[in-house]
Amino acid sequence: MNDAFRVVRNDEEQYSVMPSDMTNPPGWRDEGTAGTRAACLARIGEVWTDLRPRSLRESVAARTAP
C-alpha cells in the first residue's frame, strides 16, 4: 500500500489527494504538501474552506458588489 501522497489543486482552486507516484491529471498541479493520506486530507481541510469553484465565487462576488 502506498503511504506517500501529495495535495494537488486545479485552476478552480479545488483540492484533491494523489498518490505521490502518479502523474497529475491535466489541469491539476502540486499544492506543495506531501505525506500520509491523513496529513494531506488534514491540509485540504485547513485550506479548502469554501468548496465552491473559484469561477462561481467570483461570479457571485461580481453580482453582489456595489
Image: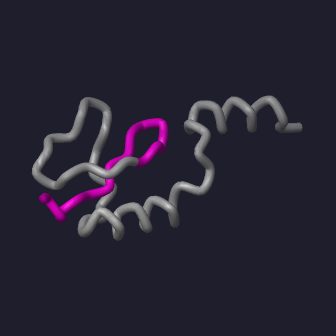
What residue is drawn where x is 37% and y is 48%?
16
Q: Is residue 38 magenta?
A: no
Where, quadrant-wise, is the C terminus in this rendering? top right
Say how many tags the image has.
0
Is residue 29 placed above or below 59 in the rendered structure?
below
Q: Position of residue 46 (x, y in %)?
A: 52, 66
Q: Position of residue 5 (x, y in %)?
A: 23, 59
Q: Position of residue 62 (x, y in %)?
A: 75, 32
Q: Is residue 5 magenta?
A: yes
Check the image and name the residue furthest to the front. Answer: 1
How has the structure been colored for display? one colour
**In-image side of 46 versus 59 (left or right):** left
Magenta-colored span: 1-15
What residue is drawn where x is 24% and y is 69%?
35
Q: Position of residue 61 (x, y in %)?
A: 74, 38
Is residue 33 placed above or below 28 in the rendered structure?
below
What residue is drawn where x is 58% and y is 31%?
55
**In-image side of 54 versus 61 (left or right):** left
**In-image side of 36 versus 65 (left or right):** left
**In-image side of 60 versus 42 (left or right):** right
What residue is drawn where x is 26% and y is 68%?
36
Where, quadrant-wise, is the N terminus in this rendering? bottom left
Q: Quadrant of residue 60?
A: top right
